[in-house]
Amino acid sequence: MKRWKFWLGLLLSAGFLFLALRGLGIQEVWEPLQEAEYWWILPGVVVYFIGVGIRAWRWHFLLRPIKQISAPAMFPVVAIGYMGNNIYPVRAGEVLAAVVLKRREDVPVSASLATIIVERVFDGVVMLSFIFLNLPRLAGMTTSSGFVGNIQTLALWGSGAFFGALTVFLTAAMFPRKAERILSWLVEHLLPERYQEKVMGIIIRFLQGLESLRSPHEALIVYLVSVVIWLLETGKYWFVMQAFPMEVGFLALMMMNGIVNLATLIPSAPGYVGTFDAPGIAVLVAYGIARGTAAGYILVLHIALWLPITALGAYFMIREGIRWREAQAEVREEDPGLDLEG
């Protein structure tokens, strides 16, 4: 029962893969794969890793109120987190990165996770911005791809969720004492007494992790840096596209980037199998790309996104000398409510 999320993820991945590949013959995908000019992947990887470096700077910026840690020192931790998300279930890389940071810099796991959650909320806002830029074009599309008709609904519901979360975090950051009093009242009235002290300790460390958002200026910096990060990732989409006999505009790739990354929030097998691929193919088909070519491109793009950062993160994790079970034990020791296995 403890691993039900893992099995649910496998089931959903299988369903998404079925939707992505149904009706496609092997030859339809194989031909564009044979003709692809794979050297285009190399500049795409370079651009992507520049984005990872900027992610390290963003995390360094968010952590400043807790501890000054240089961006270069954050880079291996970010890579380990990506690797964990790619090979372990339920996005466990986020917690794994927080554990590594605690080992290296003695930053509490709860405080690190607060900054990571803030990053993900800003990422979601940027993804939705990319989608909204293309909504007029999207409204004129008619396709049987299976996903495009629901993208506007996804964008509207997603906007409510991400902007709502952002509002809560910004309010808690700007009024920390009031937020602490409200949360303390809730803990006192909703939880048994034996859990209250531990939970309040986690909440206080979490609120400490939000300190970098106490001014609109700093929140704007985080948002603009997030836009740059995702534009660079879209640049990788563009470079990989050059390897294939297909062409869509950069704005279309921005929208696809937004859609596939929002879709990866759906539980899936490790590496976002299926949840990345099916909506990516659907968007390209909606733009008039042949399904076989779209499937070949998405397959190569997915591997190009997954493999380099996973290999680098595994190297850093080995060098760090941390094992998966050790990380789980450290999480349970500091915050029993957190779980690397979901």
Image (cartoon, rainbow, N blue to C red):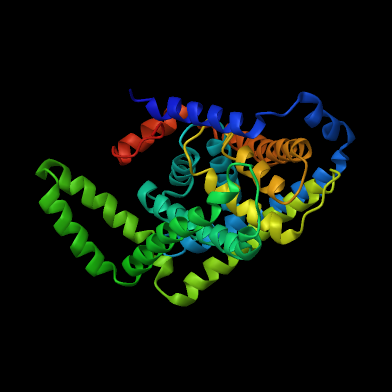
Quarter location, residue 163: bottom left
Of 25 and 249, nearer the camera is 25
Residue 161 in percent (x, y) is at 41, 57
Compared with residue 289, is residue 254 higher up or lower down, i.e. above or below? Answer: below
Pick the quarter of the image with the N terminus. top left
Residue 231 in percent (x, y) is at 67, 60
Compared with residue 25, is residue 304 higher up or lower down, i.e. above or below? Answer: below
Residue 18 shown left or right of residue 233 in the figure:
left
Could one spot residue 216 in this view of the protein? yes
Of 88 and 282, nearer the camera is 282
Residue 318 in percent (x, y) is at 59, 31
Pick the quarter of the image with the C terminus. top left
Residue 186 shown left or right of residue 328 in the figure:
left
Residue 279 in percent (x, y) is at 61, 43
Of 302 and 64, nearer the camera is 302
Residue at (54% x, 71% y) in the render: 221
Residue at (46% x, 56% y) in the render: 158
Residue at (10% x, 44% y) in the render: 193
Could one spot residue 323 in this view of the protein? no
Of 137 and 302, nearer the camera is 137
- Count of number-bearing discs: 0
Compared with residue 155, is residue 147 higher up or lower down, i.e. above or below? Answer: above
Compared with residue 58, is residue 95 higher up or lower down, i.e. above or below? Answer: above
Residue at (49% x, 26% y) in the render: 11
Residue 186 shown left or right of residue 303 in the figure:
left
Residue 174 shown left or right of residue 244 in the figure:
left
Quarter location, residue 90: top left
